[in-house]
Amino acid sequence: MSGRAQLMWDEAVTGYDFGPDHPMDPVRLELTRQLVGAFGLDREMEVVAAKPAGESTLRLVHRQDYIEAVKAASADPRSADGAYGLGTMDDPAFAGMHEVSALIAGQSVGAAEAVWRGDAAHAVNFAGGLHHAMPGGASGFCIYNDAALAIARLLELGAERVAYVDVDVHHGDGVQAAFWDDPRVLTISLHEHPRTLFPQTGWPEETGGAGTAEGSAVNVALPAGTGDAGWLRAFHAVVPELIADFRPQVLVTQHGADTHFEDPLAHLAVSLDAQRAVQVACHELAHEYAGGKWVALGGGGYAVVDVVPRSWTHLVGVAAGREIAPEAVIPDGWRQEVFARTRQLAPARMSDGRWPVEWASWEAGYDPADRLDQAVLATRRAVFPLRGLLA
C-alpha cells in the first residue's frame, strides 16, 4: 500500500446539472474542490481522474433496460421515460446525463479499485454518494448508484466482507436494495425517520433478506430535530460494535452533508463539527477493523455555500492525514471566489463553534422514555440478536 490518499476529481463531474432551479447545484462541487485547494490538501494527495464506468460495470447494479433509458434521455431529454424515474421533478433529464453520471460512478469505482489493490490507503470522491438510484430507476437526484457500484466492484475483485456506513439525512435505500440478499455486504444507514422524510424507507425492521442475509441491513431512524449529541450518541451506540463484529475488508462511507441544521430539505440539527467528528470516527474504524482500506463519498447537501464545501473539505483533510482544525480561518481568496460566483457571503471559519462536540455514550445507560434512545433501542433490538450480539 502506498499510504498516500487519492482524491478522485474530474472537472467534468460539475456537468451533473439538473438545471438552475434544482437544489443539487453543481457549484457545491466546484466550491469544495477550490476549498480543498485553498488549504493545500491536493498537494497531500494524488489527484486522479478515473475513466467513466462502462456498461459492463454499470450492469453490476443496474438493469440493461434502465441504462438504455438513461442513454436515450441523455441524447434527447424530451424523450425521457418517466417509468424509469427520468424527466421528473426530482430527476429532470438533461443532455449528456448518461455520460456525466457514468463519470461520477467511474470515480467511485476507481476509488474502490485503488484502495483494494493497495494503490492508495484511502480514496475520496465527494461528487459521489448518489445512494438513491435503484437497479431499474432514477430516484432522489440520483441516476447511477456509484456507492453500490463501488461495492459491487469490490466484490467482483474478491472482497468477501464490505461494510457501508451512510450518514446522509436520507435513507441509503438504493445501496440497501442492491445488497439486500447479499451477506457479504453490511449496510448501515443513520437517517431522519421515514415518517418525516423521503424516501419513507429505512425502518429499523428492515434487516436484510431472509436466510443468510438477515441482519445485514441496519437502519437507525432518528427523530426530526436530532442534534449533535443525539446524532453522535446514535452513531457510536450502533456502528462501532457492528463493524467490530463484521470485520470488513473495506469500509465504504457516505457523508451527505444534509444532516446540517441549515440544510433546506430536511429536519435534523447537526453541526459541521459533529459531521467532522463522524468523519474522524469512520477513519478510525477503517484503521481498526478494515486494515485502513477506506472509500469515502459525498452525497446530499443543499446549503451549497455555507455547509457542503466545508464539510467535504474536512472529509478530504481527514483522508489525507492532514485534519483541518475546526478553528481554522478560511482563506480570503476562497471567500472572494464564493462571492463572485454566488453573491453570497462565505463563512469565515471551518467550524460552527461547537467543537469539541459532547455526547453521552450508550454504555453509560439509556432512557427508554427518550425519543433518541428509543430509536437506538429499536435498531439494536431488531438487528443485534440476528448477528449474535446483545441488544
Image (cartoon, rainbow, N blue to C red):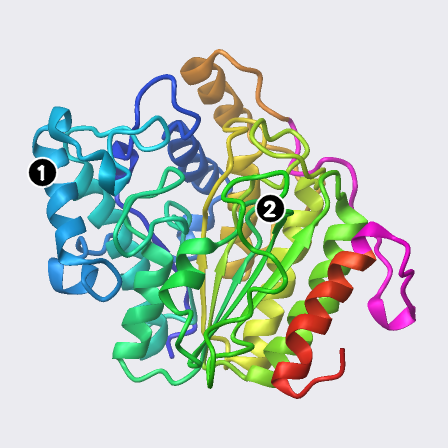
Q: Main secondary structure of the magenta part?
A: loop
From the image, which quarter does the N terminus lie in? bottom left
State the image coordinates of residue 303 (x, y, percent, origin top left): 55, 28
Provide the secondary structure element on which disc 2 rests.
loop
State the image coordinates of residue 118 (x, y, percent, origin top left): 35, 78
Give the amino acid type for the residue marked by disc 1 in the picture.
Ala
Q: Which mark is residue 194?
A: 2
- Kindly tell me whether residue 379 is visible in this rendering: yes
Q: Residue at x 37, y 45 (%)?
A: 127
State the image coordinates of residue 223 (x, y, percent, origin top left): 73, 45
Q: In the picture shown, does residue 211 fall above or below 292?
A: below
Would residue 117 be found to the left or right of residue 286 on screen?
left
Q: Which mark is residue 72?
A: 1
- Foreground residue, 109 or 74? 74
Give the amino acid type for the residue marked by disc 2 in the picture.
Pro
Would residue 40 be found to the left or right of residue 87 on screen?
right
Would residue 390 be found to the left or right of residue 243 on screen?
right
First-in-chain label (2 vs 1): 1
Was residue 382 drawn as part of the magenta stretch in this picture?
no
